[in-house]
Image: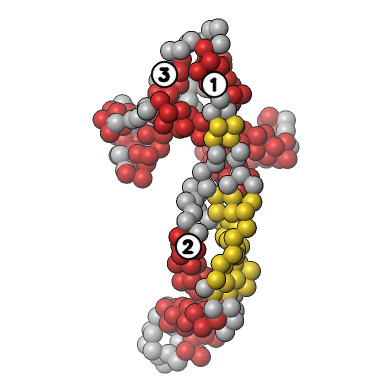
Amino acid sequence: MTTTIEKLPAKTYKLTITIPKDVVSQAFQKALTTLTSQVKIDGFRPGTAPADLVKDKIDPSKLRGEVVNTLLPQAVSSAIKEHHMAPIINPRINLKQLEDGKEATFEATIVELPEIVLGDYKKAVSDIQSFNAPRPLTPERSDGGQAKTPTKTADITNALLATSKVDISPTLIEEETTRMFSQLIDQTAKLGMTVEDYLRSIKKNLEELKAEYKKQAEENLKLEFILTEIAKVEKIAVSDEEIQSAINANPDSKAREELAKEENKWYIRAILLKNKVLIELSKGI
């Protein structure tokens, strides 16, 4: 396997990975063997039919998908280790060539933690003449208190955004914008609406909403990185006890059960950490 790396702006990199044809052929054979057990052919028990008969029955896209699942994870992982990279999101894959008996080529876009330059955030915050500490966050209130106390939170977050520099990868912004749209689709569906209905209600078209979401996504990401960096500088942390207390505060037993899962605790920790940073900064006003 060979790899080349191209440095893009904002801590983004494009890895071009080439896999030898013999490895590709082995992956196709392995995929064919795996799928053989799922194909029914008259006169043969599952998994016993000749490979040439099975291949004719298998959907080519399904076969390619199985090959991709065999080749890509290990290849990408090896390339990341080779170049000593630390991705913060899953690599974005672009398959360039994949045929049995030929070299496979694909691109992986890697995004690392952006460079964060904190300005004199303490002075910027202290210059705010009137600011009430943001209301404490809970797992069910993930808006950072902004929805109900916009002027209180906006003053301090605007000061942080104005004094700090974070160059966000376009790939990261796209990921966050997509997440926001997915959330919108889910929310409108629960209300018995379509996205088109929602757009009519706010008197905007899809392109206008996309532009708004893109801008909002970039600001959200910048603020997230800034607050996390300040937490490191100020040595602000969230304890396991604080996380458990936040979970217990939710009145819904099913919600508590879901929040208690390990894969969800990082989300609670992030919310609580940002809240603690904002409260700590507000003390300087």
Residue 57 percent coordinates (x, y): 52, 83
Three-letter amino acid code at disc 1?
Answer: Asp
Q: Secondary structure at mark 1?
A: loop
Q: Are marks 1 and 3 in contact (CB under 8 Å)?
A: no
Q: Secondary structure at mark 2?
A: helix
Dot placed on the residue nearer the N-terminal end, 2 or 3: 2
Tell me the residue that label 2 is attached to: 82
Dot placed on the residue nearer the N-terminal end, 1 or 3: 1
Tell me the residue that label 3 is attached to: 280
CA–CA distance in space, label 2 to label 3: 41 Å
Residue 61 in view here: no
Picture residue at 56% right of the left edge, 67% below the top? 3
In the rendered view, tell whether residue 126 sits above or below residue 163. above
Q: Is residue 195 left or right of residue 112?
A: right
Q: Are marks 2 and 1 in contact (CB under 8 Å)?
A: no
The label nearer to you, 1 versus 3, is: 1
